[in-house]
Image (cartoon, grey):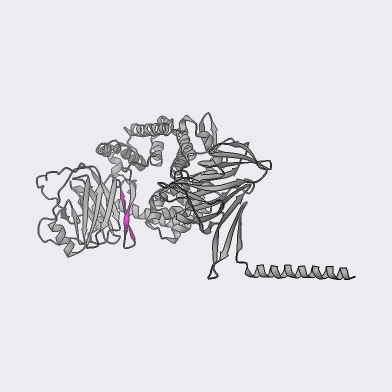
């Protein structure tokens, strides 16, 4: 009896001690665990309480997905190798967020970002890991582990194939070694995806084709340009797109004036012309009305918030003119969250992302997460035979023009993201569809030209010159380069780069009402007949802040000054210009020409403020 009493007392005492210690631990414990789940992606973070009682992230990130786990903590730190430094830096977790329902982003010290995004169906989800690195980074290394029991089927420096519970998975990156995956600025993406043994196509497998070489692609584009020029010869009934592509292709060869003269006069006088061809030909007042209508269409298209908006030529330029627009940002977010796309929609989003990346990185970041969904859609639409790729959707083959859009989008995205397999896959698509361009008709060749040629400034384009007072200043032009500068003292200067002695036409929007304009360092007045003179000239639309400009270049870089104050006007009148050629040599001033009707003679003659009606300039 006594023994039982002692035993029971000791048991109760031990239980009380455990309870008291447990209460003590629970009361003073400061750490907590943060868990999130995105499809099969599981995230585990740790948070502790700071002195102020607020939650602070600990340096522990664990991300698991279908048999693979990525870790960044004190034991296995995320390391950044910096150019010029011998020892890699150990990075610390700073913050995290979920920018979309199917992605998460982790911010580390030194400005490093890691994003994990999930795409595909539940049965065959795909994980994409993207690293954003600082400019001085050599590489970033992230620790990973494979679930116990997984068998390595094949392994290289860039590829690991695993067998996990009778399922095959592939891990691909720029470098995989020593239990870490490496990222660089040229190869910033890693992927982990289900491997379907019955699936025959992948862009990685087409990278070895001869048609995947850039040299083969370059030869194909050269032939397409030549075939376009040859097909135009002798044509009388032409479309505007045919005329524009022909003039651009000829101008690229230094035959601008010859190309302008080769366009049939019936087209120039016809009613089918729009703003598209206005940089080459006159009647700017009429052409400007069609440009205003197009800008209004862009606004309506963006507000409709549909994925098809990305296939509209020029829509990205409109977005960059209105970067703060809620409608623009909503449209980009819609694309970022899209899960169901056509193959053409996928290509248009990739192409838009590449353009935005070059013109407005903030807008590009909004749509970046859509890239993998787009690539997956394009990949599943491709098949290969005899080293040629064909693309089909819902049992129907895409057209040559659609295929060119898809191939070009892959090339540009592959170059921008550092994914060489996608860039080379794009070359294969373009070479597969365009190799026989000699048999294409003029309409097809003309439609293809702006899709695959991006380095010819002679092709009419929008140029965003900057923002003044919060409003975009932009031009519709075929000039190689234009600049805009407001000195804040009453003078705005615009420069235009175009071959000397050549004439072209520019529509500039966002020019505020001015007092005086100087062209060739001469004061000009508005003149509705400005297009008929053998000189530069203009008409100003004060109601829309639009300058309609005929620019005949006395030098390669022409300078236009807009004067807004008396002091600036006096400075302009005192100004002496030394004209130089492209090599910087001083050009002797030519004999004083007789002033055209659009130029002011010397004297204090009042300047027009743009009230003259431009309609008579037609």
Q: Looking at the picture, tell me which residue is in the foreground, 246 or 576.
A: 576
- In percent of width and height, residue 492 lies at 24, 58
Q: Residue at x 58, y 37 (%)?
A: 155
Total residue callouts: 0
Is residue 316 rendered to the left or right of residue 76?
A: left
Q: Using the rendered image of the protein, determine whether residue 274 is visible from the camera's viewpoint.
A: no
Q: Looking at the picture, tell me which residue is in the foreground, 357 or 76.
A: 76
Q: Residue 325's quadrant in the figure?
A: bottom left
- Quarter of the picture containing the N terminus is bottom right
Q: Looking at the picture, tell me which residue is in the foreground, 421 or 47.
A: 47
- In percent of width and height, residue 469 lies at 31, 63
Q: Looking at the picture, tell me which residue is in the foreground, 20 or 277.
A: 20
Tell me if residue 358 comes above or below residue 489 in the rendering.
above
Is residue 348 rendered to the left or right of residue 524?
A: right
- In percent of width and height, residue 429 lies at 48, 36
**Of helix, strand and loop, which mostly describes the magenta segment?**
strand
- In percent of width and height, residue 153 lies at 63, 36
**Residue at the extreme top of the image, as rendered:** 386
Q: Using the rendered image of the protein, determine whether residue 548 is visible from the camera's viewpoint.
A: yes
Magenta stretch: give its range: 464-479
Q: Residue 111's quadrant in the figure?
A: bottom left
Q: Is residue 473 magenta?
A: yes
Q: Is residue 252 magenta?
A: no
């Amino acid at each position: 009896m006594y023994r039982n009493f002692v035993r029971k007392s000791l048991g109760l005492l031990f239980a009380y001690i455990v309870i008291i210690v447990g209460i003590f631990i629970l009361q003073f414990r400061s750490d907590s665990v943060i868990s999130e789940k995105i499809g099969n992606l599981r995230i585990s973070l740790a948070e502790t309480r700071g002195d102020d009682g607020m939650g602070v992230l600990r340096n522990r990130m664990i991300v698991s997905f279908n048999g693979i786990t990525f870790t960044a903590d004190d034991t296995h730190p995320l390391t950044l190798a910096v150019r010029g430094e011998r020892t890699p830096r150990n990075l610390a977790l700073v913050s995290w967020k979920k920018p979309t329902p199917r992605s998460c982003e982790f911010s580390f010290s030194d400005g490093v970002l890691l994003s994990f995004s999930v795409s595909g169906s539940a049965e065959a989800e795909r994980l994409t890991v993207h690293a954003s690195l600082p400019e001085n980074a050599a590489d970033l290394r992230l620790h990973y582990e494979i679930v116990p029991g997984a068998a390595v089927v094949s392994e290289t420096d860039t590829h690991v194939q695993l067998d996990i519970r009778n399922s095959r998975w592939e891990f691909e990156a720029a470098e995989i070694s020593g239990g870490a995956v490496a990222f660089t600025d040229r190869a910033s993406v890693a992927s982990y995806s289900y491997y379907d043994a019955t699936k025959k196509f992948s862009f990685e497998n087409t990278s070895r084709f001869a048609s995947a070489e850039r040299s083969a692609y370059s030869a194909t584009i050269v032939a397409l340009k030549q075939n376009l020029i040859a097909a135009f010869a002798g044509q009388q009934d032409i479309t505007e797109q045919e005329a524009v592509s022909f003039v651009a292709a000829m101008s690229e060869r230094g035959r601008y004036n010859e190309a302008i003269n080769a366009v049939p006069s019936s087209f120039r006088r016809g009613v089918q012309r729009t703003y598209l061809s206005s940089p080459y030909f006159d009647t700017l007042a009429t052409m400007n009305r069609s440009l205003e209508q197009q800008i209004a269409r862009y606004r309506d298209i963006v507000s409709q918030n549909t994925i098809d908006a990305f296939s509209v030529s020029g829509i990205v330029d409109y977005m960059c003119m209105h970067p703060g627009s809620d409608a623009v940002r909503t449209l980009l977010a819609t694309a970022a969250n899209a899960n169901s796309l056509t193959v053409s929609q996928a290509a248009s989003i990739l192409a838009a992302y590449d353009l935005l990346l070059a013109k407005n990185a903030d807008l590009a970041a909004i749509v970046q997460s859509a890239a993998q969904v787009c690539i997956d859609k394009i990949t599943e639409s491709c098949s290969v035979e005899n080293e040629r790729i064909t693309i089909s959707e819902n049992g129907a083959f895409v057209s040559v023009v659609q295929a060119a859009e898809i191939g070009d989008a892959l090339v540009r995205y592959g170059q921008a993201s550092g994914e060489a397999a996608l860039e080379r896959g794009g070359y294969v698509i373009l070479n597969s569809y365009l190799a026989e361009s000699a048999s294409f008709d003029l309409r097809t060749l003309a439609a293809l030209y702006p899709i695959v040629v991006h380095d010819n400034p002679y092709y009419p384009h929008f140029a965003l010159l900057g923002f003044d007072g919060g409003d975009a200043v932009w031009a519709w032009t075929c000039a190689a380069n234009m600049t805009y500068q407001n000195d804040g003292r009453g003078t705005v200067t615009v420069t235009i780069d175009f071959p000397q002695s050549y004439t072209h036409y520019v529509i500039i929007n966002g020019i505020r009402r001015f007092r005086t304009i100087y062209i060739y360092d001469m004061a000009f007045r508005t003149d509705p007949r400005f297009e008929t003179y053998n000189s530069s000239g203009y008409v100003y639309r004060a109601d829309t802040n639009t300058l309609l400009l005929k620019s005949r270049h006395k030098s390669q870089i022409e300078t236009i000054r807009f004067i807004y104050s008396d002091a600036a006007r006096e400075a302009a009148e005192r100004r002496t210009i030394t004209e130089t050629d492209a090599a910087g040599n001083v050009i002797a001033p030519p004999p004083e020409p007789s002033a055209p009707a659009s130029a002011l003679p010397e004297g204090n003659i009042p300047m027009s403020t743009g009230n003259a009606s431009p309609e008579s300039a037609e």
